[in-house]
Amino acid sequence: MYAHPLHCTFPRADEADLFSKKSRSAEEALKGIDLNQNIEALIENPLIHVTPEQLKRDVRAFVRSTGLEEHLELFRKGAQIAKDSRIFEAIPDVTDVEKKALREEKTRRFRQPPALYLTIIICSIGAAVQGWDQTGSNGANLNWPQAFHLDTNRHSNDFWILGLVNAAPYIASALIGCWLSHPLNYHLGRRGTIFIAAWFCFLTVFGSACTQTWVQLFICRLLLGIGMGAKASTIPVLAAENSPAAIRGSLVMGWQLWVAFGIFLGFTANLILYQVGDIAWRLQLGSAFIPAVPLLMGIYFCPESPRWYIKKHRYHDAFRSLQRLRNTPLQAARDLYYINAQVQLEEKMLGDADILISDGKEYTTSSGRYATRFIQLFTIARIRRATLAAFVVMIAQQMCGINIMAFYSSTLFKDAKASERSALLVSWGFGLINFA
């Protein structure tokens, strides 16, 4: 049986010519891409230069190698549309229902299946968890230092402890959580990574509410940061990989909107709970478990990323996932074939592929080399500039003072002689304006 180029098996002798033609085609496409010169970061459609005859042969080989032979005609139509989306009206076998769905990709972009909207809702909840985790400590800062016998007004060391505990989630996120997202995603997929991260966000806030010393609170918030880092690195990726290209940018940018909504909910919880007595700060920290519950319960009802399935050579699962995420099977077949072509090209370009040689021919297999991708952040000029720009933007975001308000607004207003209620109320107003 013919093997897809990403498989470790090899083609039969009678299909070797076809495979070598396909390999040469990929090599020719790579000649036009120099990552150091590709300033605009554009990757050309890998199918654009494939001839109609070659495309037919490639589709037949693809469905044989992936066990999708029963869908040959569907993938034949889908590949033609993936090569040039403007010609679907002229393809004779495309039904009126399929043509209508393809037209509505531009005229009614948000007419999408329920599974896609479920994915976006769950991703939005994950973003809200991020914001609520951040602001739960805002109100708690008014009381937990006294509960642990810290006096920030008299002892400078106690002031540093307060700052260390508040910064703990982002210390762990930067040093551990974000870096763990790659191996977690590689082995567990997008949903698995989010599920593990959600458990961290669920259990650690309970732990924070039950701590008896500031050291215990510090450790709980470090563990919270691991979950926050892995989650923040994965949820936008799941949203992007499950979304159609026409609305992908809008849905991914929703991450920051719903983080701001979570910040507002955290301020709301702080205001509601401040009057319950000595345990108010515990409840304010622990209240962040609320959005983590639907995230834990809902993430496995969402389809897994088709792109992740393709990288794992699980094409049947990828096709089933896309059928839930697209309005017609034709759109699912088109996107599966196109994503697969992109993945092949990207793995060769970015060093994610190992080259196996047999009988003088090269075959690529995915290896997901972590160190190579890290080094490319600094060795490829275009990526190095993007990395530097990201560093500058994130540092500037912190230096502008927005997170001082998110963490310490209640403390600032209380130090300005406002009552606890007034301080929390003004902080709630800040959260509302930040979301609005």
Image (spheres, rainbow, N blue to C red):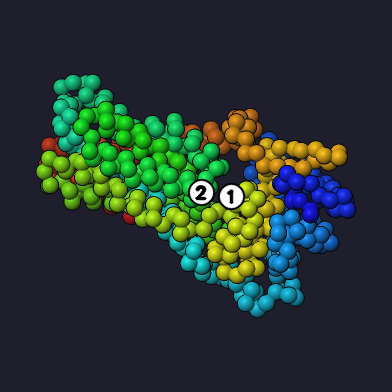
N-terminal-most mark, 2 or 1: 2
Q: Observer-nearest residue: 403 or 305?
A: 305
Amino acid at circle 2: Arg
Question: Where is 147 relative to 420, above or below?
Answer: above
Q: Secondary structure at mark 1?
A: helix
Where is residue 331? Give x, y as percent: 63, 66
Amino acid at pointer 1: Trp
For the residue pair 359 and 420, the one nearer the viewer reads as 359
* Residue beneath the point at 80% across and 38% down: 357
**In the picture, which quadrant includes the N terminus?**
bottom right
At a point 48% along the width and 43% down the height, the residue shown is 233
Is 278 left, or right, of 245 in this rendering? left
118 relative position to 144: left or right? right
* Mark 1 surroundings: few (<14), some (14-19) or many (≥20) residues within 10 A: many
* Image: 96 above or below 152: below
Circle 2: element type:
helix
| Structural distance between the alpha carbons of marks 2 and 1 | 8 Å
Marker count (numbered): 2
Q: Which residue lies under the disc numbered 1? A: 308
The circle drawn on residue 190 is: 2
How far from the left and from the top, in percent, is residue 145? 19, 31
Residue occupying the point 29% across, 42% down: 205
Residue 352 lies, in percent from the top left, at: 66, 39
Residue closer to the observer: 419 or 288 = 288
Mark 2 and mark 1 residues within 8 Å of each other at the beta carbon: yes
260 relative to 106 in the view: left or right: left
Q: Is residue 400 visible?
A: no
